[in-house]
Image: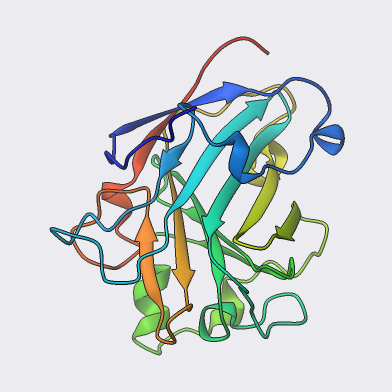
Amino acid sequence: MPRPAPHFAAIWPAHPLVGPVAKIAAASLSDVGPDWRELGQAWRAEPEPGFNSGWARIRWNTTGLLFESVFLQCQPANRARSLNEHTWEMGDIAEYFLQETTTGRYLELHVTPENQRLQLLWPLGGVDRFRADTTALSEFLISDPDWVQSAATVAADHWTARAFVPFARLGLREGEIPSGWRIAVCRYDRSLGPEMYSSTARLGEPNFHRHAEWSELRLRPGV
């Protein structure tokens, strides 16, 4: 099946999950198809030399969202060995973003090839305060290791990551389905040494936190 090319669509329709999340097999390169989005570098006319392709998919059921990603790369690695280390400084990562547009707060979740995570919940303006060194990163960290579920696998020429985010972690009541959310999947690739950025979002510059440029999440019926 042909794999999709990046087109940075404004709306991302999430397809329903079938069966319990715990029994869904990890995605592989052969799974990538029309319901996946390719990551790209929308801020450039052409991808950087050495660019490795990647794809992402969002699925859902009445309890939460499942992020999945597949990245072409040989020997991915990250030095993080415990929860909430500075993964973006330590190697390859998948980044999953989800924003509640009514309040501006958003989830930032990193998953490494070794399945270590960084979990952040940003209020509107929180990233600016952290970057200005007026607020510590610890103010935004989620230290509960069971807050979300994640997994990662490494193959000869690619690696995969996934994360399941329960709706309850977003402050929703049981059975309440979110609306008015933005979403993006991003990546740090350190195959060539310095990080190479890519994203499903139509970003005007290589800054993943430009949430106004993320896609609108639409949950397709069928669960």
Return the x and y of residue 40 as percentages of the image width and height: 32, 54
Return the x and y of residue 25 as percentages of the image width and height: 79, 38
Residue drawn at 59 percent across, 83 percent down: 86
Residue in the picture at 67% in, 50% down: 162
Q: In this view, does 130 lie above or below 50?
A: below
Colour approach in the figure: rainbow
Furthest toward the bottom, the residue is 133
**Image quadrant where residue 186 sits:** bottom left
Q: In this view, does 218 lie to the left or right of 169?
A: left
Looking at the image, residue 63 sits to the left or right of residue 16; the answer is: right
Q: Looking at the image, is 222 positioned above or below residue 79?
A: above
Residue 165 quadrant: top right
Locate the C terminus by quadrant. Answer: top right
122 vs 47, left or right, is right
Compare residues 74 and 35 and report the one nearer the observer. Answer: 74
Tell me the residue at 42%/55% (across/down): 53
Of residue 55 and residue 202, the one placed in the foreground of this image is 55
Q: Which residue is drawn at 42% across and 62% down?
A: 52
Percent from the top left, x then y, of residue 151?
76, 55
Quadrant of the rendered image containing residue 204: bottom left
